[in-house]
Image (cartoon, rainbow, N blue to C red):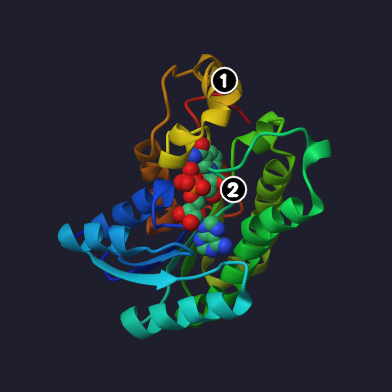
Amino acid sequence: MARLDGKVAIVTGAAQGIGASYAKALAKEGASVCVADIDDPAGTVAAINAAGGQALGVNVDVSSAASVRQMIDKTVAAFGGVHILVNNAAVFGKLALKPFEEISSDEWDKVMAVNIRGVFECCKAATPQMRAQKYGKIVNIASGTVYKGTPMLLHYVTSKGAIVALTRAMARELGGAGIGVNCIAPGLTMSDNVKSNTDWAEPLINGINASRAIKRDQQPDDLLGTLIFLSSPDSDFLTGQTIVVDGGSVMH
Ligand code: NAD
């Protein structure tokens, strides 16, 4: 029996990148997975089905409350519940590095709408179902940049810092309802968009390994053990925490 048999998971931003890895890992552990993204999630759904798992693809804009509501309703209709919510969708991998004085108000608002309000909307929409089940695992995806104060991505770093704060406050509100709320803060990870973002090669990618205790590139697979732990009953007495998974670059 797999660890997540009978559980239903939603992973936002799972059409590609790290989110696709999360969705596949949860399915491999036995969860039925809603693969949700603003882009076409068909590739991830097909990969899960081909591996013998259960997946549902849903188009969602996490910054829209109505769209998020539909995502939850479709998941419950297909699989009968929502036990695990992984808030992974973000404006990230295609961002340009720039001094904060050059970030426009529109760019700021877009990043905040997806990266932090999107997390709020998804948690708010999933919580009634989790409360009814008296069980839920919310895993929010922050970033090691919060602890490093990484420059040239001020809107992004600020949005991810807010996720750490949201996680703590929400954990206190939901602790009595059997719902755990935790965070993963990944270090720079070789996802598809990161690898192809040439703007980042010199300032971000080169040299980052030197800051790590474990001196190698970080891959999406490096995040999966922590994701499954936070999604499973093994973490039932853990809430409000942020686990930095980055090869020992940040220690806190
Ligand atoms: P990515 O930018 O490649 O993927 C983000 C996904 O979110 C995409 O599939 C995109 O279509 C989706 N998305 C964007 N806006 C959306 C919206 N409004 N509604 C629904 N889906 C939307 O990012 P990635 O490298 O795969 O990283 C995944 C997560 O991990 C992000 O939250 C990112 O901030 C975080 N993270 C990544 C790294 C890294 O180095 N790759 C490091 C720290 C944290």
Position of 53 relative to 22 (above/below): below
Q: Is 224 left, or right, of 142 in this rendering?
A: left
Q: Mark 1 falls on what kind of element?
A: helix
**Distance between the alpha carbons at the discs numbered 2 and 1:** 32 Å
* 120 sits left or right of 18 in the view: right
**First-in-chain label (2 vs 1):** 1
Q: Is residue 55 above or below residue 21?
A: below
Image quarter where the N terminus lies is: bottom left
Q: Quadrant of residue 173?
A: bottom right
When asked about the image quadrant of residue 109, the answer is bottom right
Relative to residue 91, is residue 77 drawn left or right?
left
Above/below status of 240 relative to 132: above
Q: Which mark is residue 224?
A: none
Q: Position of residue 23 (x, y in %)?
A: 35, 57
Tag count: 2
Residue appearing at x 37%, y 63% in the figure = 41
Residue pictured at 39% horizontal, 64% vertical:
40
Percent coordinates x, y for residue 36 in the rendering: 43, 66
- Give the residue at x 60% y 35%: 144
The answer, for residue 182, to whether it is visible in the render is yes
66 vs 94, nearest the viewer = 94
Q: Nearer the viewer, residue 119 or 240?
A: 119
| Residue situated in front as seen by the camera: 66 or 165 | 66
Residue topped by disc 2: 241
User: What's the residue type where badge 1 is placed?
Assistant: Glu
For the residues carrying marks 2 and 1, which lies nearer the camera in this image?
Answer: 1
| Residue, disc 1 | 202
Neighbor class of circle 2 (other Cα within 10 Å; few <14, some 14-19, many 20+) is: some
Q: Position of residue 174 (x, y in %)?
A: 61, 68
Q: Quadrant of the C terminus?
A: top right
| Amino acid under disc 2 | Gln
Task: Work out whether residue 4 can be spotted.
Answer: no
